[in-house]
Image (spheres, rainbow, N blue to C red):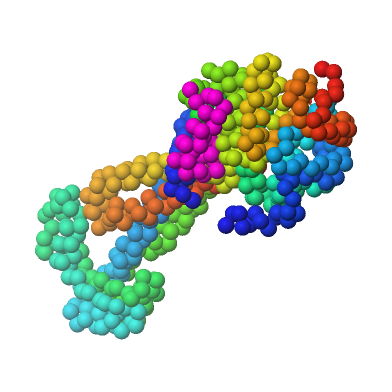
Amino acid sequence: MKISTVARHFREGAKNVGRNGWMSFASISSIAVSLFILGVFMLLALNVNKLADQLDNQVQISVYLETDTDQPKIENVERLIKRIPEVKSVTFVSKAEGLARFRESMGEDGKQALEGYDDENNPLPDSFEVEAFNPQQIAFVAKQIEAINESDPDKPVKRVRYGKGTIETLFSITNGVRNIGLFIVLGLAVMAMFLISTTIKMTILARRREIGIMKLVGATNSFIRWPFFIEGALIGFSGSAAAAAGLLIGYSQLVIKTNHSMGLYMLQLSTFDEVKWLVGGTILALGTLLGVWGSTISIRKHLRV
Amino acid sequence: MQDVEMDKVRILTGSDNVIEMQDIWKTYPDGTTALQAINVVIERNEFVYIVGPSGAGKSTFMKLIYREEVPTKGQISVNGFNIGKLKQRKIPYVRRNIGVIFQDYKLLPKLSAYENVAFAMEVIETPSRAIRRRTMEVLELVGLKHKAGSLPAQLSGGEQQRIAIARAIVNNPAVIVADEPTGNLDPETSWGIMKLLEEINFRGTTIVMATHNKEIVNTLRKRVIAIEKGSISRDEPRGEYGYEN
Ligand SMILES: Nc1ncnc2c1ncn2[C@@H]1O[C@H](COP(=O)(O)OP(=O)(O)OP(=O)(O)O)[C@@H](O)[C@H]1O
Ligand SMILES: [Mg+2]
């Protein structure tokens, strides 16, 4: 196709969008709304994945010892834990160290609450932090440690603690949310496409005379159809551009606003740079595709050449 | 490339016939038989009147030529192309060789006279410089160069028909199909249109014109094909109209 022809098709397509003002606006809005919602679910999914990764890293077993456990016993328990093949590392955390860490993690608020505690009256026990090679082995390793405790007549371990099931729960909730979300988005997308195809149909009807003359003087079918494809694509693209802009601007604000409070829990949202191409690109491509799809339906039905 | 493909569907008769119909029948989907057993040959550069009572099948005859309708039975070739056998996507290229004129002009109301004519060239992707030159040329030929910027609503019926004729000839078709081109015009204006069509015919374009205008047919003598109840009842060189108005 010649450049001048391409330019003409774009001009005509854009003219169609303008001529059909209100219908175009409705179509653009419906594309924008459905893709905005899709975008929200995409961002949610991306962040859940990231969160799960972060939680994975944090998942480790804390083994709290009885307060009166003596040094040789501590070393013995440590050696036994180290012998479990799934264990990657064992770190001894003395009760003084534990208190310091606790203070730090509580931040400003915690400082006051923990005031008055020092080495003399430290309520925390000594503990081990045990890390497995693989987060999935955590539960198994915890059982092994409990078994070690059972076989020792002194029962030196007071409590074995790990983030039992947090990730699983997180995933099952988000799976549910995602399925509902996909359902809603699918419904909205079909509606948007239907609206686009109706819009294109109205343009075709409005330009019936012109199309008739084009056929009469020998314009090819593709020449006649192109402006309508472009009209659909422009509607889809405009709607998705609006959705993408809204989403990404909103998200960048959200990241800035929550950065501080999330940081307290050692967690972080996906950064703007991590999501912008994936979310923006997907939405733009999908919107344009929906637009072209909608116009294809209408052209098939109403532009018999 | 396009032309090479087109050659495959050409009927290689070597003849100089612009239109050939062999045993053409046309029955509309509702069961009306508009044409039956039509056999016609129209040669290059002929000027032919199609006459006959209302409802005889004249418009149907014209529509078969520019392939608005397809025959129920029989073969038609236009300018050497067997248009019955033609693939759908090749039809546009055949239509470029046929100019069509209607009683009601069918101009686009929002386009100026110039734009209406140029439109026919634009949509077959003619380079813009050629469009400008050729459009002005045909506007001059139909005597409306000075009205190039007027909208159809600002033109008289005769002027609108001249613009429609300019649009029909702008792509240099081999044949002009005109269905009652003077049907809406007063006698004087009609004569102006006839002079123009004669000039176009003189320059080498075949003209097939359906008409109810007795005076024109009997004065500007040409071949006359009469259709009655779907059949050709008469086909005479320099014939007469043969009906009372
Ligand atoms: N699209 C159609 N569907 C069904 N019947 C049709 C159609 N077009 C024309 N006819 C019928 O076919 C017959 C021929 O019609 P046509 O228009 O060819 O006549 P005509 O000779 O052009 O008449 P007129 O002089 O009034 O223009 C008529 O009986 C008409 O009712
Ligand atoms: Mg008629």
The residue at 73%/25% (across/down) is: B220
Specify whether B122 is left or right of B78: left
Considering the image in quadrants, where does the N terminus of chain B appear?
Answer: bottom right
The spot of residue A293 in percent (x, y) is 55, 47
The residue at 47%/41% (across/down) is: B130
Question: Within the magenta stretch, is there residue A146?
Answer: no
Considering the image in quadrants, where does the C terminus of chain B appear?
Answer: top right
Viewer-closest of A16 and B138: B138
Viewer-closest of B218 and A76: B218
Specify whether B86 is left or right of A113: right
Q: Main secondary structure of the magenta part?
A: helix
Viewer-closest of B40 and A31: B40
The spot of residue B52 in percent (x, y) is 83, 27
Question: Within the magenta stretch, is there residue B141?
Answer: yes
Q: Is residue A167 visible?
A: yes
The residue at 61%/34% (across/down) is: B168
Above-or-below relation of A212 to B19 = above
Above-or-below relation of B149 to B117 = above
The spot of residue A42 in percent (x, y) is 41, 52
Find the magenta span and give its range.
Answer: B118-146
